[in-house]
Image: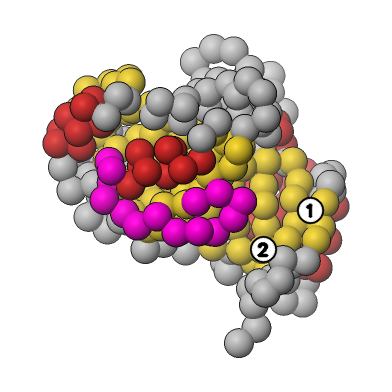
Amino acid sequence: MSHPGRPRLRSQLLPLMLSVLLLPGAVLAQTTFTHMHMRVPDTAAAAAWHQALFGVDVVERGPGPAVEYSNGLIMTLLSEGETPPSQGGVIDHFGIAVDDVGATVARARELGALIRTEPQVGVTATTIAFIEDPWGTRMELLEDPVYKGVNHVHIMASDADTVHAWFLAVFGGQDIPARGKGIFHTILYGDVWVHVSEPAEGTPAPSRYRSLDHVGFRVPSLDALREALLASGYEPYLERPNPPGSDLMFFEGPEGIHFEIAEVVAP
């Protein structure tokens, strides 16, 4: 996945990775997925559409309704003006594991989805398909009996090696190259994967204000994460309390990946 003439930042990031391992309360191996946030013109309609397709519950999680899976939320956020589709952005799509991709594609077609690919053999699953909801959010449907619900978040970066190394340095996670079969990077956070690959052409746009606006993670310590984040050359643009839950941190990382980070709430 490396490219001639492109600087490999693994060696540059190694000191940062080692320093993170030594942080008190380090976030490594404890980062977990919490949500994806879709930006849509009608939050209730978008949540209802996803509920109808996937048979999940709608819950109120603010600022708009969300659909709830066993391992995370797909949330809604009211768009402000024109919202470009997720494809073309650095957060390209998320994956949902279903029992039958063919049946789900048929149901999605009835609900007005754009069918980007019909069922086919995938990299991490025997059967996959790509669809796009009526508001421009791209999704991969896949049959994965192990990683159910929200299966993965796919980052499309102009330099996949650098972004992959950055994720490991700042968030830790289980780096399992075999799953991506040399086609893309695969890192496991709890029971949700992050895939990182490069587009066939073009430069992906920052995700903020697109139909897939940001991804959410939970970490044991925002202080530890902030230290790792600053060491990697990025900084939060907002930190705020989130009563009665944990404090929140927002930042834009490499290539404009937009993040919302929550801290684990003490029992």
The reply to whether the magenta stretch includes residue 88 is no
Q: Nearer the viewer, residue 117 or 200?
A: 117
Splitting the image into 4 quarters, where does residue 16 fall? bottom right
Splitting the image into 4 quarters, where does residue 247 fall? bottom right
From the image, tell me which residue sits under label 2. 262
- Looking at the rendering, the stretch of residues picked out in magenta corresponds to 52-65
The reply to whether the magenta stretch includes residue 57 is yes
Q: Position of residue 56 (x, y in %)?
A: 31, 54
Q: Position of residue 214 (x, y in %)?
A: 61, 42
Residue extending farthest to the bottom is 267
Left or right of 218 in this view: 94: left
From the image, tell me which residue sits under label 1. 229
Work out which quarter of the rendered image holds the C terminus and state it.
Answer: bottom right
> Image point 67% across, 30% down: which residue?
80
Q: Nearer the viewer, residue 9 or 241?
A: 241
Question: Residue type at mark 2?
Answer: Ala
How many marks can you see?
2
The crowding category of the residue bearing disc 1, from other C-alpha atoms within 10 Å (few below 14, some 14 to 19, many at least 20), is many
Q: Secondary structure at mark 1?
A: helix
* Residue 160 visible in the snapshot: no
> Image point 47% across, 52% down: which residue?
66
Q: Position of residue 7 (x, y in %)?
A: 72, 28
Left or right of 79 in this view: 100: left
Question: Residue type at mark 1?
Answer: Leu
